[in-house]
Image: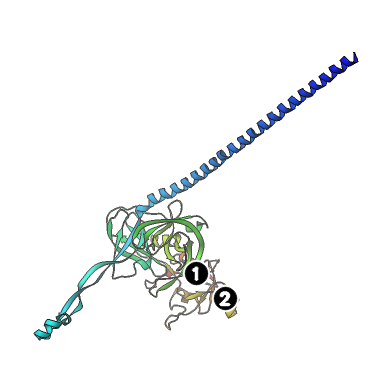
Amino acid sequence: MRKSTSLLGTLFTIFVSVMLSLILCIGFITYTQKKPVVQTNEVQSLPNTLETHSQDTLEKIQSREQVVVNIVEKVNPAVVSVVITKDVPNIERYFEDRSTGNSLFDEFFGGFSQRPQYRENGTRKEEVGGGSGFFVTQDGFVVTNKHVVDDRDAQYTILTNNGEKYDAEILAVDPTIDIAILKVKSQEQFPYLSFADSDEIKLGQTAIAIGNALAEFRNSVSVGVVSGLSRSIVAGSGFGQAENLDNVIQTDTAINPGNSGGPLMNINGEVIGINVAVARGSENIGFALPANIVARIVESVKENGEIVRPYLGIRYIPVTENMANTNNLSVDYGSLIQRGEMREDLAVIPGSPADKAGLRENDIILEIDGEKVTNEKPLTNILREKEVNQKISMKILRLDEEIQLEAILEKAPNNL
């Protein structure tokens, strides 16, 4: 009986062992089979996630691209090329007969007896340059740069994007800033652009430029961002002329020769600036005059037929930190009243509002109506925001003493 019981016990133990082994093997196989499936599912889901992200990014890019395309299509008809034409001498070539009368000599050396000569035979009209501009009124007012139309002996033609040509006359030129207003000689109604509030411009916002690049590729479009604000530059024409431009907008939008006078726009198609200059030897550093200044000039011409601006009547230079240190000044801001290079360039113009107010040479204007005069907010820009016949209060530094003076601004003479 013990042997039989022992045998049965052994068989039972073997059976249980085998069953346990089978269960473990099946469990292991099931586990190893399931694990790759889980990994495979995770790997397969990754491209779907990437594809979703890529699709969202692509849609955003396409959406922004479509916005720019729509804006360009909308504003392009209002952007024009300014074509400069001038009467130039018509030079013709002719040969002067210098024969000797010696038939034998002339027969052998006749080629030397006639020499080419040149003479002027009347004039002909020739295109000598070009710039950009844009309509700002329905009846054909065009904004451009002063340096585009500074040749009063030339004729100016407005060329629209659809190829139509119109003669234009110069209505007004601002002598203190690079802006001119033209008027198209036509009874048609034109599409025109609106101005944005350039005081609200932010760094990094989209900037779109359209213009007559190189005076050859009209209505060329470039897109960038606003790179800087309140810059001060010296803009030169390349012909020995230069002027100081304050509070201009810097952009990396491609601006080329011929773009001068064209609009710099925001993402809404509103004008934030007028392209005026590029930094020589740089890559994508361009400058535009802020829209608020130009808008006031346009309104003045529309209302008065000329540019009416307030006038104080002084010559001055901005006070800088370096100037203050060099001359031991007690302030490093403001405008120092100082005479010009020529003997007749007085510091204070006789009979001007400044003269009547008691301003003197070497006074430093620190504030106008409580607004500090700085490089970012120069005196010219502050005065431009005032009106003719407006009374202003001035904080003046005179011999290390601060005093208050008042002046009533007058209309600037046409030659200033």
Q: Nearer the viewer, residue 179 or 360?
A: 179
Q: Read off the residue under disc 2.
A: 322
Camera sees residue 399: no
SS of the residue at dot 1? helix
Looking at this view, is 330 or 200 the one in front?
200
Reading the image, the residue beneath label 1 is 379
Query: Dot 2 surroundings within 10 Å: few (below 14), some, or many (20 or more)?
Result: few
Q: Pick the quarter of the image with the N terminus.
A: top right
Residue 412: x and y in percent read 40, 70
Q: Nearer the viewer, residue 393 or 184?
A: 184
Q: Which amino acid type corresponds to the residue marked 2 in the rendered image?
A: Asn
Element on which disc 2 rests? helix
Q: Position of residue 296 (x, y in %)?
A: 42, 61
> Does residue 355 appear anywhere in the picture?
yes
Reading the chain from its start, which is encountered first: label 2 or label 1? 2
Left or right: 88 in relation to 11: left
Q: Quadrant of residue 116?
A: bottom left
Query: Where's residue 148, x and y in %?
Result: 35, 66
